Structures are given as structure tokens and as C-alpha cells.
Image (tube, grey):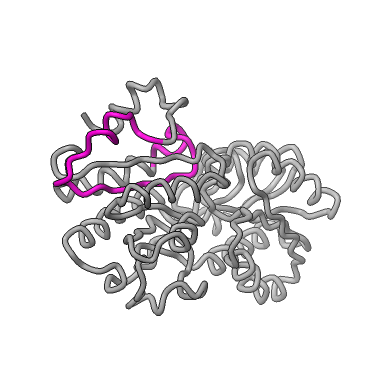
Amino acid sequence: MQRREFFGLLGGAVALPAAWPSATRAQPSARLPRIGYVTFASAVLSRRVDDAFWDGLRDLGYVEGRNFHAEYRSAEGDGSRVPALVAELIDMKVDVIVTYASGVAVAMRATRTIPIVMAVGPDLVAMGLAETLAHPGGNATGSTFFVAELMSKRLELLKEIAPAISGAGVLLFRSGDNSNANTLEGMRATAEALKVKLHPMEVRGPDELEGAFAAWGAAAAGGFIMNEHAILTFNADKIAQLAARQRLLSAGPLALPENGGLIGYGVDFPAIFRRAGYFVDRILKGTKPGDIPIEQATKFRTMINLKTAKLLGLELSPTLLARADEVIE
């Protein structure tokens, strides 16, 4: 039975527990490696990237129950649950932990021995958690992209769409590490050159989003840039609705315009999650994670929601529309 079929039997997996069915855990074969997977959102919201990862493994010849066991854990949208889920997998002595975003740093703090694959994650070198991209040296490897540069590009797009804009919010997830500080520092030069004052807001979950938008309204920000932490991207529809209510221009990951935001610039997440299977395969075949180079995303896409632009009364230049990889009408 394939994973998406399993989810289907759960009726969309809305009530998926923090673990797979007890039979999967209670009767694991000692001969098979166990792959622990920690996601932030429910199976329904994260299915697209979850499926991409498992499909990537399948492409390499992995079949659950035949040559590996899966240990799936979901924080169900509550990032504070991730440390406990990671600890549970460590106690089970899984052979590798796969996670993403701030879950990578959580896992690295929790274990220095179990290999960790970041399906996509922060710049571990900048965070002091890896020696170099070419030779991480520790127990983690995987794929990354430079968030500060990506966020700066989104700010440039926002300014291109609305040259008069002088203030922009920055929506970040409060991860508890120094990644947000690094992102804002990396954006500073671009913001100064564009003469845009940044109004950063960190949120811990979707219930804090309304407060962030209210603050930007009070600060007269003309728009905002959104980071792609999983808690945010999986709530892109709510974020787009709040932006529309405040009539704020928005630039963020591709999930934002897909759900009604204005413009997206970012990586193809399903493709990068699929690639995570490669790192797991190498580790299970004996390569130390510290010897596997961390890969940087090289393909980025621009997506514009023309319907949203019209609702905001914006006239987008033909040049900008021609540069977009996809225009939603």
C-alpha cells in the first residue's frame, strides 16, 4: 500500500495521531532500517511535500515494509511539539531523521550521533552547525537555500510593483534560533538601497497572525514579505486573506500567490523534498552525513496572481509579467 493510499483510508488524515498505527511501531523488523520523518503540519496540509519525499525514496528502490520502516510524526501545526517528537524518534533509535526548517536545528541539538537529513533547511554554516557546505562535518546534511537573499529578492519585487512603498512588514516564524536575525541582517543592505523601512514580526503560530497584520496597519506598511517556514506556508490561505483585508501587497513563497497572495518567488518544494531521498539513501548505504555535501537550491520560480493585482488596483508592467514563470488569472 502506498503512503497516499494509507492517508486516503484515514479519511484525509485530519485526525492522524503523532505516530503511525501502533502495528507499524510495535512490530518493526530488526533487520530493516527505520526512517524517522518529522513534519510540522497535519498530513492533509503537508501531503504534497510528504508524498514527494516518499516518492523520492521509492524511485531509489525503497518499499516500506520490504527494505525500510517509516516512523512518521506530525506536530499538527504546533511547532512547540517538534522537540518531543524528535526525542521520541531518538529513543526509538531510528537510523536517520528527516525533517526541515527549524526542525533541523531542534534535531541537531537533540542528537549528535543519529544522522539528520534536512529536506530543506537553513544555512547551517551561518548558524555555526556545519563546517562548510562541501563538508558539513557533523551529523546533518541535505538541501538549503540562502533565505536572506531570497527575502531580499522578494523585497525588490515588491518595490518594483509599487515604487512608492516606503515600509514593508517581514513575516517570520519564531524558531528560537538565530536564523531570523541572520535573515534580517542579510536584508538590511537591500532595504536601505530601496529606501524601505522593515517592520519584522515573529509569530509562533497562526493564532498570532492577526496581531502582526494589525501592527503593520498601525505602522502604515504598504506591504509585507513572508518567509517560508512550514507553519507559515501551510497557512498561506489565511495570510492571503488577512493581506486582502488590510489591502497589503504581498511577496513570499509560491504558496502565497497560489492561495490568493500577490507575488511569489521561491523554490519548488516538492522537487527539493524528493531530492531528500538521495541523502537518506547514501546514509543508509554507509556514508557519513558529514561527508555528504549540502546542496543549494538552484532553480527558483516567479508566480504572480493577476486576479489579486486587479483587486488591489495594480497595473503590473508587461516586463514583470513576461518574467513570471506562471501567472494566475
Quarter holding the N terminus is: top left
The stretch drawn in magenta includes residue 24: yes
Residue 233: percent from left, percent from top: 54, 45
Residue ID at (39%, 58%)? 118
The stretch drawn in magenta includes residue 201: no
Residue 156: percent from left, percent from top: 62, 65
Residue ID at (44%, 58%)? 107
Residue 261: percent from left, percent from top: 61, 43
Q: How many marks?
A: 0
Residue ID at (29%, 36%)? 25
Q: In this view, does 141 lie above or below 56?
A: below
Q: Which residue lies furthest to the right in this view?
A: 218
Does residue 180 appear left or right of residue 267 in this picture? Answer: right
145 or 243: nearer the viewer: 145
In the image, the segment drawn in magenta is 19-48
Does residue 105 appear left or right of residue 115 in this picture? Answer: right
163 or 229: nearer the viewer: 229
Does residue 96 appear left or right of residue 324 in this picture? Answer: left
Residue ID at (47%, 63%)? 109
Residue 98: percent from left, percent from top: 36, 53
182 or 22: nearer the viewer: 22
User: Which quadrant would residue 198 be assigned to in this image?
Assistant: bottom right
